[in-house]
Structures are given as structure tokens and as C-alpha cells.
Amino acid sequence: MIGMPEIIVLVVVVGVLIFGAKKIPELAKTFGKAKAEFQKGKIEGEKELKEIKGENNDSPKE
């Protein structure tokens, strides 16, 4: 049975073979930026949804 560590090593080896060792850090940086943008958009969407529902976290609840 193949475990998670073996799968990770396999993905890294295939990535190096496909993209080359010099391109991997650039791809990782781009992936990190995309993930951060996704998280920012998710947070903004949740805030807008709360505003639409009339829930404002700044006001004290009675």
C-alpha cells in the first residue's frame, strides 16, 4: 500500500521532471499568492453575506 509520504515524494519527483528544478520555487510562490487571494476573497464574501443578513459583529447583542 502506498502511504502519504510516498505520494508526496512521487508528486515532487514528477514536478521536477515536468517543470525543472529552477521553476519549482516560482510555481510555489505563485501558488502561495493564489491561495492568499482566495482566502481574502472568501473573507470578504463572508463579510458581505453577514451585512446582507443584517448581522453586524461590531454592535452589541441584546
Image: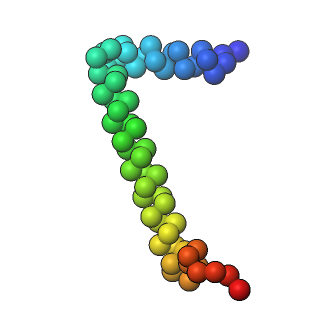
Total numbered circles:
0
- Residue 48's x, y, as percent? 47, 72
Q: Choose between 1 and 60: the one closer to the eye.
A: 60
In the orientation shown, which residue stands out farthest toward the bottom?
A: 62
Q: Quadrant of the C terminus?
A: bottom right
Residue at screen point 48% across, 60% down: 43
Q: Quadrant of residue 20?
A: top left
- Residue 29's x, y, as percent? 35, 33
Q: Quadrant of the N terminus?
A: top right
User: Going by the image, does 53 lie left or right of 30?
Assistant: right
- Colour logic: rainbow
User: Going by the image, does 26 lie left or right of 15?
Assistant: left
Q: Is residue 2 above or below residue 61?
A: above
Q: Is residue 61 above or below residue 16?
A: below
- Residue 26's x, y, as percent? 30, 28
Q: Quadrant of residue 56?
A: bottom right
Residue at screen point 51% across, 78% down: 51
Residue at screen point 36% across, 42% down: 33
- Residue 57's x, y, as percent? 58, 74
Q: Quadrant of residue 34?
A: top left
Q: Is residue 41 above or below residue 34?
A: below
User: Going by the image, does 33 lie left or right of 58?
Assistant: left
Q: Is residue 50 above or below residue 11?
A: below
